[in-house]
Amino acid sequence: MTADPIPPGFVPISRTGPFLDLFGPVYTKDEGSSTIVAVRVGDKHLNTLGIAHGGMLVTLADSALGINLSRALDVPRPMVTVNLSTDFLQPARRGDWLEAHVQVQRVGVHLAFASCHLKVGDRLILRASGVFAIIGPEVPLPAREDFDG
């Protein structure tokens, strides 16, 4: 695979971890109040059919949802996925520039909701909706005996 240029405005993600390091490189671009998260589909992302593996697509959507929901808060806080629903619409192929576009619907005290579209140009590859739990010391948890669900 030849090294295709990264589209203008995208920069390497500033904060990552061991899993995204293996998955990436991952790029971001701020657009209004949203952050587009993107990758170039490489050989390591392909399944035996030679198209992007479903797990790769879900990983990108899940990561983009979490990044955007965390940034939607006045003070970014960690979140974990509670539910992720996905629909695979078209294949992504080696060399494709795959972008995750997120729309935040609601951020509450304990839960946050958003949707994501993975796109290659104008082609819609995957749609996802996610629910995330907001965690961290900033969210006071009720005492165990006071917790009712």
Image (spheres, helix red, strand yellow):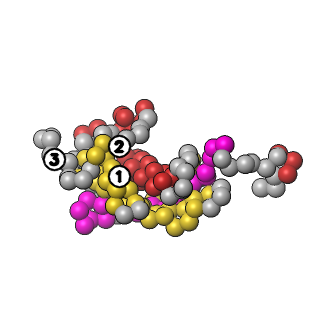
Residue 26 on image: x %, y %: 32, 43
Q: Mark 2 Cα within 10 Å, few/some/many (few <14, many 20+)?
A: some
Whether the residues at callouts 1 and 2 have beta carbons within 8 Å, the answer is yes
Element under disc 2 = loop
Which comes before the other along the chain, label 1 or label 2?
A: 2
Q: Which residue is mark 1?
A: 37
- Left or right of 20 in this view: 71: right
Establish if 120 lies above or below 46: below
- Per the rendering, the mark at residue 119 is none
Image mark count: 3
Q: Nearer the viewer, mark 1 or mark 2?
A: 2
What residue is rendered at 42% in x and 52% in y?
A: 64
Q: Is residue 60 visible?
A: yes
At 34% across and 61% down in the image, what residue appears? 31
Q: Quadrant of the N terminus?
A: top left
Name the amino acid type tagged 3. Pro
Question: Element at badge 3?
Answer: loop
Q: Is residue 21 magenta?
A: no
* Extreme residue toward the left, this view: 2
Residue that carries the numbered disc 2 in the rendered image: 13
Q: Position of residue 45 (x, y in %)?
A: 30, 42
Q: Image point 63% across, 44% down: which residue? A: 136
Q: Residue furthest front?
A: 74
Q: Amino acid at mark 2?
A: Ile
